[in-house]
Amino acid sequence: MKKDTRLISKHIAGAKNGKQVSFNFLLDEFWSNVYYYLVKKTKNDNDAEDIAIQAFSKAFEKIESFNEKYHFKTWLIAISKNVYLDFLRKEKTTISITEEKEEEAYDIIDDSPSPEDKIITEQNLAKLLKDIKQLKPKYQEVINLRYFQELSYKEIAEAIDAPINNVKVKILRAKKLLAEIIKNTT
């Protein structure tokens, strides 16, 4: 047990220094703890996976703030809980229409985009594709497979012949790098 604690501490320090190997280790080591915690909360595998990815992303962004006096797993679960609560708040703010009013709502709401909306969407997509092209090819590939071809992590892992956890980390990293590119070009 002491060896595991020392190894985890070593990788936390490595992650604080930006070492990708340490991020991978921590993700592999704690993924199932966070994921299964969230499956119990959400009762939905896809939501749990998405929230877990967001939680790890947030944890890795804030790794500098981790205090070694506490257990890393507890810290991750606390972050996961907060991301889950944010998820619930977003769910509550979505408009729910009762069955009796559903037909009435379809008569009122016009979902078709206006010509201006179409132009804006096309421009945003063109800019996004341009930003994606600034990523390294390995990150472009996982973004394309996940978000444009809508493959599952398992399917992506098979397509690029890599373990699922590596795929998750690659997608996490690609999203983070893409967010930085988008932020710097706006």
Image (cartoon, rainbow, N blue to C red):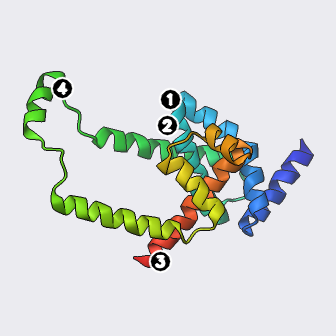
Left or right, 141 with respect to 185, comes to right
Residue that badge 2 annotates = 47
Left or right, 135 with respect to 87, comes to right
Q: Residue furthest right?
A: 3
Residue at 52 percent of width and 43 percent of height? 51
Quadrant holding the N terminus: top right
Residue 129 lies, with reference to residue 170, above or below; the image says below
**What amino acid is at disc 1?**
Asn
Question: Which of pointers 4 and 1 lies earlier in the amino acid sequence?
Answer: 1
Which one is nearer the viewer's eye here, 145 or 38?
Answer: 145
Residue at 74 percent of width and 46 percent of height? 162
Residue 127 lies, with reference to residue 78, above or below; the image says below
Quadrant holding the C terminus: bottom left
The picture places residue 156, in percent across and down from the top left corner, at 63, 44
Residue that badge 1 annotates = 44
Asked whether the residues under the numbered discs 2 and 1 touch, taking CB atoms below 8 Å apart as contact, a structural biologist would say yes
Residue that badge 3 annotates = 184
How many numbered discs, if any?
4
Mark 3, Cα crowd under 10 Å, few <14 / some 14-19 / many 20+, is few
Question: Which of pointers 3 and 2 lies earlier in the amino acid sequence?
Answer: 2
Q: Which mark lies nearer to you, 3 or 4?
A: 3
Question: Which of pointers 2 and 4 lies earlier in the amino acid sequence?
Answer: 2
Mark 2, Cα crowd under 10 Å, few <14 / some 14-19 / many 20+, is some
The picture places residue 44, in percent across and down from the top left corner, at 50, 29
**What amino acid is at disc 2?**
Asp
Residue that badge 4 annotates = 98
**What amino acid is at disc 4?**
Thr
Residue 133 lies, with reference to residue 170, above or below; the image says below
Mark 4, Cα crowd under 10 Å, few <14 / some 14-19 / many 20+, is few
Asked whether the residues under the numbered discs 3 and 4 touch, taking CB atoms below 8 Å apart as contact, a structural biologist would say no
Which one is nearer the viewer's eye here, 52 or 89?
Answer: 52
